Each structure stands twice: as structure tokens, then as C-alpha cells.
Amino acid sequence: MKKRALITGETGFAGRYLSNYLNSKGYEVWGLDVVSYPEQSEQNIVIRTADISNNEQIEAVLAECQPDVIYHLAAQSSVAVSWQNPQATMRINLEGTINLLEAVKKLKLNSRILLVGSGEEYGAIQPEHLPIDENQRANPQNPYALSKLYQTLLGLHYMRAYNMKIYLARPFNHTGPGQNTGFVIPDFASQIAKVEAGLQDPVIWVGNLSAKRDFCDVRDVVQAYCAIIEQGQIGRIYNIASGQAVEIQSILDQLLSLSAVPIQVTIDQHKLRPVDVPMIYSSISRIKAETGWEPQIKLHDTLKDTLEFWRMQVKKEKQ
């Protein structure tokens, strides 16, 4: 009998990749999200539309699905949006997690549950403490990071109080084809594609280019999620990253080198974040040692694939 996996936030960026990967591994995949897309019904996925903030809806889906494993990806995941709307960020990321865990408790399910946190939970780290490992004290610097730290603490509470099988992932920046704008790489790639198509003046608007971040391909990240829930330890935090810091300027330079036309770079003051952290990158020693996972896709290949995705999107818009 197939194992049954439930993905909250299945129609989101990482959720779509995760459902495809779980399908390829032989799972029966159920997706839960506030929206559903017609093309998903053509895949081997059972889709249920529900609001993670509504406890009755979540409980009804869990009662029907009875999942062996739950991947909790549903979240408000933009740092920029969290500054603009901290209330919605906390409601979705905290109340949503409580609703999920309460439903599991009430229904007495024995599901293994992966809570997806964020490398942002570590916050501003002094250079001498880099790369960040899982023993580093959390020090969130924005409302999104704060909501994810609270989620981690909630998970540990439910594990201890109710003996739940909670696994904790802290992915750093993950990117790839299909990620919405509002994140640095799709912001750059979408603008380049529009300039190439003549839909935008040959100027790209950017934020802080000196920040250094750790980027991992989403296709690698979803494999890490599976590795943690299948081979990781309950109640243990696992960082998911490339293990390298890359300057945003370098990412922009690589994307511009792939552009078919010359483009001018201009700073957009609105894209500059308050309390921006100069450098973040992670150790992946724990996840590698305990699950065998390590990233396979090179950043340059991720950038090429992402730019190609946006070229296709722009082409569709022009038709």
C-alpha cells in the first residue's frame, strides 16, 4: 500500500516541486492550499482547497486524508511583505501551524510532520560565527523570521507535550524556475526577460547588491525535505543550504551575462530593506552526515533555468 503524503501550500513554489518528487518516489500525494489550479488535477495529486487559518477546514482535510507524512509548507514567506503586513504574516505562519498540529492531536494521527522554518531565524550573525550551524542561537531580524522561530518553538512544544513526530527544516534562500517575483533572483530574471522582449526600458531596478546570501536550487531543497522526514531525527533542526555565500552583485552579473541585450543597473530605494543582514551562509554538515543529502545543482544552472522560465512567461504575456 502506498504511503500517503499531505503537502500544505502544495500550489506554492516549493510545493509543486515537492509533489512531483514525492510522486516519483511512489507516494500518494495530497495537496492542501487556499487556491487550486486545474492543471494539478491532471497530475497524480489529490487537491483539497482549505485555508490554513481555518481550523475546521484543516481538521476536515486531515480527517479525510489520514496522512502518513505531512510537509507543512503553507506560509507567508516574503520578508518584504512581512514588514508591510506583520499581522497577516503571524496569522498565516503561527495560527496556521497551531491549526495543523491541533488537528493532528485531536484526530490522534501518527503522522510524521516536517515544519519548514527558515535560515532567516538566525538573523544577524557575526562573521566569526559563520558558517551558521544548528547550534547557533536564533536572533530574528524581521517579522517573517520571528514568525518562523515561533513556529519552531511550537513544533518542539507539541513534540514534547503530545509525543508528536516533529521534524524541523531551516532552508536558506531557495530559488529556481517558477518562483514569484518579490525575491531577488526572479526579480532580476523577469526584468531581463521583459527588456529582451521590448516590454521594459533597458534598465534593471535593484536593491542592496552587497549583501551575501546562501542560495540553493528548489529541486535540491525538496529532496532535502524528504531526506529529513525519512532519515532525520525527531525534534532536530536541519539547515538546508549550499554552504556558500554569494554576493547579490555576482548573481546579477551572471544573469546580465546571459542577457541578449545590454542593460543599465539602477538602485531602487524601495527595494532596500530595513535591518538588512550583510552576510548569511550555512553549514550543511549535520544534514549531510545524518541523511546523506547534499545539493547537486550548480547556481549558474539555476540562474540559466530561471531566466529561461521568465523568457517563456514573457512570451506568453505577449501572445
Image (cartoon, rainbow, N blue to C red):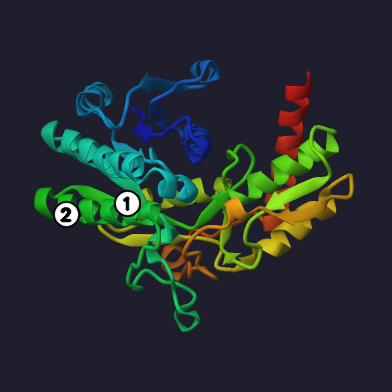
Cβ–Cβ under 8 Å for marks 1 and 2: no
Q: Is residue 252 left or right of residue 155?
A: right
What element does badge 1 sit on?
helix
Placement of 20 over or under 119, stated as above or below: above
Q: Bin the neighbour count of mark 2 within 10 Å (Cα to Cα): few under 14, some 14-19, many 20 and up.
A: some
Tell me where residue 190 sits by quadrant.
top right
Which of 72/3 is in front? 72
> Measured from the top left, where is residue 35 in percent x and y?
43, 23
The image quadrant where one finds the C terminus is top right
Residue occupying the far front of the picture: 269
Q: Nearer the viewer, mark 1 or mark 2?
A: 1
Whole-number angstrom distance, CA of label 1 to CA of label 2? 15 Å
- Amino acid carrying label 2: it is His
Which residue is located at x 57 percent, y 64 percent? Answer: 213
Placement of 277 over or under 116, stated as above or below: below
Which residue is located at x 40 percent, y 21 percent? Answer: 47
Residue occupying the far bottom of the picture: 128
The image quadrant where one finds the N terminus is top left
Q: Which residue is mark 1?
A: 147
Q: Is residue 305 visible?
A: no
> Measured from the top left, where is residue 11 in percent x and y?
47, 30
What element does badge 2 sit on?
helix
Which residue is located at x 52 percent, y 38 percent? Answer: 13
Q: Is residue 76 left or right of residue 194?
A: left
Which residue is located at x 48 percent, y 77 percent? Answer: 130
Tell me where residue 244 sits by quadrant.
bottom right
Q: Bin the neighbour count of mark 1 within 10 Å (Cα to Cα): few under 14, some 14-19, many 20 and up.
A: many
Q: Which mark is residue 157?
A: 2
Residue occupying the far right of the picture: 261
